[in-house]
Image (cartoon, rainbow, N blue to C red):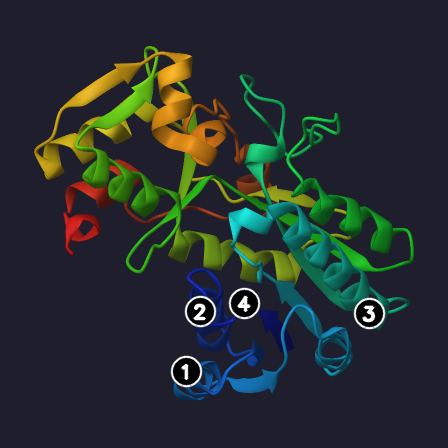
Amino acid sequence: MHVFVTGATGFIGSAIVQELIRAGHQVLGLARLDAAAKVLAAAGAQAHRGDLENLDSLRRGAAASDGVIHTAFIHDFSTFQANCEIDRHAIEVLGSALAGSDRPLIVTSGTALLPPGLLAIEDSVPTSSSTALPRIASEEAALAVASQGVHVSVVRLPPTVHGDGDHGFVPLLINMAREKGVSAYRGNGLNRWPAVHRLDAAHLFRLALEQAPAGSRFHGVAEEGVVFRDIAEVIGRHLNIPVVSTSSEEATNHFGWFAHFATLDSPASSKRTQEQLGWQPKQLSLLTDLERGSYFKT
């Protein structure tokens, strides 16, 4: 297949590009800058110039493809809601270019959108209340384009996708602990984060592209729920700083805008995903990956 990949030079997208190429697919990767175009060329992919706000470039990239994997997202939490709306419009445009065909569109979402405290499964529906995370826009857009006859599927990723080159939530926690001199958790710290290695996630995206029935939802989850206190303890040990329990108010002060995620209890299952696609995560667990030490090199 000739596959259009947004976010093709990102942490997850770059792994997807390599996964696709190894499987014999051709990749057209969205590139905003010359540097990104060079990275794609070196990886054996073709660059397509544009970005998430250049809707015409997205439309042309999708129209020229046999399928689309959409992983790009603007990770600036100071404008999070606006960025989620940008993602909604990008998905709508990608879908419009594929409507009426059987060409697949794979949309990225997150397990953190699902109701907390319960083991989320693929059929679980994101919380749509006034307190819902704005990122629900991505799944809403996927539903909208599905109603237009687009062969769309959703891959939900956990709060942490780990591996070499990670610049997501775990590095943020490490930097926060380093700056504040303590590695913190709220209360007993038993809230859970599901997790997956980036290479396992990349493999799942390829399988979804090749096999997913229209309207499918998949969970890119290798570990159903890593206890947050265990993450904090590994961080504290590697940084040689105290590991402390905080009250809800103290957690809000310590974590700031990140407090919602640091206190999130969002276990998730991928049992149906594994059965349906034959996906079998094989990479390191999150805690084993952290214990290797590469996350703590400055």
> In the orientation shown, which residue stands out farthest toward the front?
253
Query: Which quadrant holds residue 46?
Result: bottom right
Mark 2 residue type: Ser
Query: Which quadrant holds residue 19?
Result: bottom left
Mark 4 residue type: Gly
Numbered mark located on residue 7 in the image: 4
Indicate the secondary structure of the residue bearing disc 2.
helix
Q: Are marks 4 and 1 in contact (CB under 8 Å)?
A: no
Q: Taking the image as drawn, is residue 1 in sight?
A: no
Q: Are marks 1 and 2 in contact (CB under 8 Å)?
A: yes
**In the image, is residue 122 above or below residue 188?**
below
Indicate the secondary structure of the residue bearing disc 3.
helix
Residue at the spot of label 2: 14
Q: Position of residue 5 (x, y in %)?
A: 59, 71
Towards the viewer: 65 or 175: 175
Q: Please rate how many residues cluster around mark 2, counting C-alpha atoms within 10 Å: few if below 14, some from 14 to 19, many from 20.
A: many
Q: Position of residue 14 (x, y in %)?
A: 44, 69
Question: Is tag 3's residue or tag 4's residue first in the polypeptide sequence?
Answer: 4
Residue at the spot of label 1: 39
Towards the viewer: 5 or 133: 133
Mark 1 residue type: Val
